[in-house]
Amino acid sequence: MSLKKTPSSTFTLCPAGLWSHAAGVSHEADSTEALWQDYSLLFQGFDDLALARWMAQSLAQLQGNLWRMSHPLVASYRLAAMVGLDRQIWHQRLVNVPPDFCSADCCRAPVVPMVTRDLLEKGLVCVHCGQQMVALDQIKNQQLAEKLSQWAESYAPIHAVAHWGERQRKSQDQYEHAFEQAAQKSETQLSYLGSALAPLLLDDFPLVIWEDQDECLQVRPEDIQL
Ligand SMILES: [Zn+2]
């Protein structure tokens, strides 16, 4: 199991990880954080108004759909959000956001939830600050909340294979087999999350992002067919 990370080392592999996965399921990747900081120089060159305008316009373009976290515009938006959080851009009320987006309690940014494998620990995660935005029991559609909870419970032991210790691994051959099986199950489960569960959140949110990878199991976005 990985150790609990400090905030400065909470990035997982690109481009999913701009927030901390729950303790025990996160992944050490300081070099990824450095790379993302480097990418973010583009937005750091924007003044506050230009950044707020770019974000508001992007929200309007993303609105109404469920998006893969790996989508390049989503990744770009998350970079902008990282800079915007540092500058407290949404507290300044520089621009009008599209009307369907109310403000998130966590950071006053427009409500944009991300569905990740940390549903049990973190609920729906805020794209802007990386904190819990809506706990599972606060989701309006409680039937859906229950399904999301069940999904996360069944996903946890699949993901855990990536973090098995020496004692659980038995032999290298056996572990490779178990890892491969877990990766295949992960693909199926993430596909179900992205095709059957996450879309239902669009009834309550103007835009939803789902995490279409599991870097610890080496499951990539292109492995997940919908
Ligand atoms: Zn937030």
Image: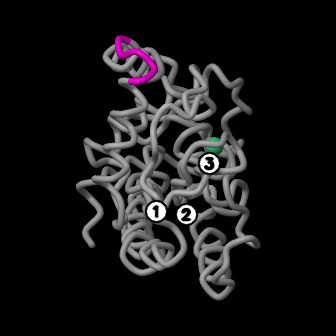
Residue type at mark 1: give it. Answer: Ala
Q: Indicate the secondary structure of the residue bearing disc 2.
A: helix
Is 115 positioned to the left or the right of 50 in the image?
right
Residue placed under numbered mark 3 in the picture: 164
Residue type at mark 2: give it. Answer: Ile
Residue 115 in the image: above or below residue 106: below
Which image quadrant shows ligand 1? top right
Query: Which residue range is magenta in the image?
Result: 45-49
Q: Earlier along the polypeptide chain: callout 2 or callout 1? A: 2
**Does mark 1 have its CB less than 8 Å from ligand 1?**
no
State the separation of the CA atoms marked 2 and 1.
Answer: 5 Å
Residue 129 at what x, y percent from top left?
61, 37
Residue type at mark 3: give it. Answer: Trp
Residue 77 in the image: above or below residue 62: above
Residue 173 at what x, y percent from top left?
43, 51
Residue placed under numbered mark 1 in the picture: 182
State the separation of the CA atoms marked 1 and 3.
Answer: 12 Å
- Say which of 121 and 95 sits in front: 95
Residue placed under numbered mark 2 in the picture: 158
**Does mark 2 have its CB less than 8 Å from ligand 1?**
no
The residue under the point 56% across, 34% down is 93
Residue 165 in view: no
Is 57 positioned to the left or the right of 169 in the image?
left
